[in-house]
């Protein structure tokens, strides 16, 4: 048995409900593919409405007890889960590379990053606080308390199979909420292994359920229509997010939405160009470009544009493409054939409209869903490639002359998740960071995500924050008790 087979054999492939594995009520299963080869890795149970209801029944049964569990105990379980994920870091990393395709070193980084949400929120659980004051009018006293929102549904994407789950599970469990996770159908295995880890960490049955399904709506629809569910937290595309916001209206559910991005990466003429190239490689090529924070538009001062483009092209052209689990791979396959076609279409359209290919620009033949690491410059301002999320290893460069022009270009999108600026001027950093319509700004940094910082978008990139001290608030209700003098 290869170590891939041994690992896959150790991952639960049933539904995870009430602290244990089971078949789907309707008996269905669906396949999980390796995007590096297109081959089937394994199959998992396919949840439908009946399973969703069973998961919510079990969540509701334990919700009150979990909320009443001392915060210190909730913290200990989260901390134990962090330890177990850390102990099994290689298994989690390889599993993510197998089902999602990213290069193994990137998976290892994600394990450390994703696990950290469990440790961070284990430390936040005992610090949930209220307030007690005298009313300024002198008419009474004000007691403010915090209570868990209640049973939550989390819907996660395929691009960060662990971290997009732990960013929700960590704060929910810390706050005293129960949670049902519906992982992306292309990458359910990582969440299945995490469910097992939580059981091993001592989490009571029912607090966390994992429902893989090939039909997301069949699970999320009935759950969101059930008045017992109190919140939906979603990471994924803006289109699906919008639909979930609509569906949350009848029950007036709390919603947290981490949606699409279209990050500008602005290089000013006073930037350290080498540092900007390093940052651009990280911000663009991390996760093969399949990140919501990926630099989607490289907006470079005309004074340094050619210098920057030459250096970036040299770095991107030298990147090693291959299966994520092969030694030396820097860029793995895209998640599936559809994603690869969508990247190819964006590039082909931009080139037809006048963009120049500096390197790459084509699909790589053979099994697996590979696309050449690509740099385009002279990208026409109205191209779809700068208006939409590329979600692939393609850097699209445009130029500018003045700071105002750069800010206007950066803000000319309905998205507002991450933005990056490279400049050696502190004044300019702060001025431009203020002017950018985005939830997060990296200054002379190509990687900004940090479990201790609030991650979230403005405009059509979403609602709410994950991580930081802000993250747990998304899972807490505020209650006011009026007291006499
Ligand atoms: P997606 O919206 O297609 O799917 C996300 C999740 O929603 C999956 O679990 C999917 O099965 C589920 N889903 C799809 N249709 C649904 C429906 N009708 N009802 C309920 N659930 C449904 O997104 P994706 O392709 O998995 O992920 C890529 C997108 O996620 C990109 O737009 C990216 O920017 C975004 N993303 C955002 C963040 C962030 O924090 N803002 C992080 C990672 C990814």
Image (cartoon, rainbow, N blue to C red):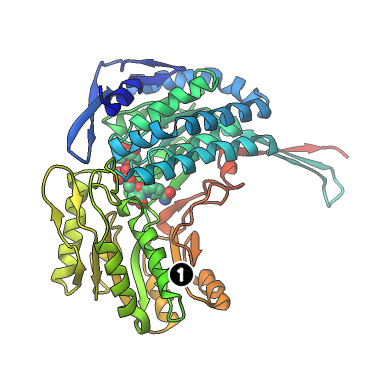
Is residue 134 at all visible to an observer of this figure? yes
106 with respect to 319 (left or right): right
Is label 1 in a helix, a strand or a loop? Answer: strand
Number of marks: 1
Q: Residue at x 44, y 64 (%)?
A: 419
158 with respect to 367 (left or right): right
Q: Give the image quadrant in which the ligand numbered 1 is located.
A: top left
74 with respect to 384 (left or right): right
Q: Residue at x 49, y 25 (%)?
A: 198
* 292 or 274, nearer to the observer: 274
Q: Residue at x 49, y 59 (%)?
A: 439
Is residue 253 at all visible to an observer of this figure? no
**Residue 373 position within the rendered picture, expressed as x and y whole percent measured from the top left:** 24, 59
Residue of label 1: 421
Q: Residue at x 32, y 22 (%)?
A: 13
Answer above or below: position of 380 versus 171: below
Q: Quadrant of the N terminus?
A: top left
Answer above or below: position of 434 versus 334: below
Picture quarter containing residue 397? bottom left
Circle 1 Cα neighbour tier, 10 Å, few/some/many (<14 / 14–19 / ≥20): many
**Residue 418 position within the rendered picture, expressed as x and y whole percent measured from the top left:** 44, 60
* 326 or 305, nearer to the observer: 326
**Residue 50 position within the rendered picture, expressed as x and y whole percent measured from the top left:** 34, 19
Q: Quadrant of the C terminus?
A: top right
Picture quarter containing residue 123? top right
* 428 or 439, nearer to the observer: 428
* 296 or 241, nearer to the observer: 296
Mark 1 Cβ and ligand 1 under 8 Å apart: no
**Residue 180 position within the rendered picture, expressed as x and y whole percent measured from the top left:** 44, 28
Answer above or below: position of 48 versus 169: above
């Amino acid at each position: 048995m290869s170590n891939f087979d041994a690992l896959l054999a150790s991952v639960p492939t049933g539904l995870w409900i009430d602290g244990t594995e089971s078949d789907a009520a309707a008996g269905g299963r669906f396949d999980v593919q390796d995007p590096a080869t297109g081959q089937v890795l394994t199959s998992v149970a396919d949840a439908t409405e009946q399973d969703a209801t069973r998961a919510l029944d079990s969540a509701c049964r334990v919700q009150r007890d979990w909320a009443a569990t001392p915060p210190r105990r909730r913290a200990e379980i989260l901390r134990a889960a962090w330890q177990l994920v850390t102990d099994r870091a290689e298994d989690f990393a390889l599993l993510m590379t197998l089902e999602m395709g990213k290069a193994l070193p990137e998976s290892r980084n994600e394990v450390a990053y994703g696990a950290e949400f469990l440790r961070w929120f284990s430390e936040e659980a005992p610090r949930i606080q209220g307030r007690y004051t005298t009313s300024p009018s002198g008419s009474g006293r004000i007691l403010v308390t915090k209570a868990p929102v209640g049973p939550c549904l989390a819907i996660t994407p395929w691009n960060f199979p662990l971290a997009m789950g732990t960013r929700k599970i960590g704060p929910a469990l810390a706050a005293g909420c129960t949670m049902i996770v519906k992982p992306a159908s292309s990458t359910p295995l990582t969440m299945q292994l995490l469910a097992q880890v939580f059981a091993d960490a001592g989490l009571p049955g029912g607090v966390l359920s994992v429902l893989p399904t090939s039909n997301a709506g069949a699970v999320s629809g009935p759950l969101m229509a059930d008045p017992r569910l109190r919140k939906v937290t979603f990471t994924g595309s803006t289109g699906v997010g919008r639909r979930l916001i609509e569906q949350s209206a009848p029950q007036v559910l709390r919603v947290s939405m981490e949606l699409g991005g279209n990050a500008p990466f602005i290089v000013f003429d006073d930037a350290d160009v080498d540092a900007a190239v390093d940052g651009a490689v990280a911000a663009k090529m991390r996760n093969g470009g399949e990140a919501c924070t990926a630099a989607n538009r490289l907006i470079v001062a005309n004074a340094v544009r050619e210098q920057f483009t030459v250096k970036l092209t040299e770095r991107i052209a030298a990147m090693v493409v291959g299966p994520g689990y092969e030694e030396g791979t820097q860029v793995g396959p895209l998640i599936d054939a559809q994603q690869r076609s969508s990247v190819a279409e964006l590039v082909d359209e931009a080139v037809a409209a006048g963009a120049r290919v500096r390197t790459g620009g084509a699909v790589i033949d053979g099994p697996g869903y590979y696309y050449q690491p690509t740099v385009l410059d002279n990208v026409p301002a109205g191209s779809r490639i700068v208006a939409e999320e590329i979600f692939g290893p393609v850097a699209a460069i445009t130029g500018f002359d003045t700071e105002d022009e750069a800010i206007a270009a950066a803000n000319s999108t309905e998205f507002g998740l991450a933005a990056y600026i490279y400049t050696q001027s502190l004044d300019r950093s702060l001025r431009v960071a203020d002017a950018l319509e985005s939830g997060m700004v990296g200054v002379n940094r190509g990687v900004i995500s940090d479990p201790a910082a609030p991650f979230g978008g403005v405009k059509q990139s979403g609602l709410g924050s994950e991580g930081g001290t802000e993250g747990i608030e998304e899972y807490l209700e505020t209650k006011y008790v009026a007291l006499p003098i």
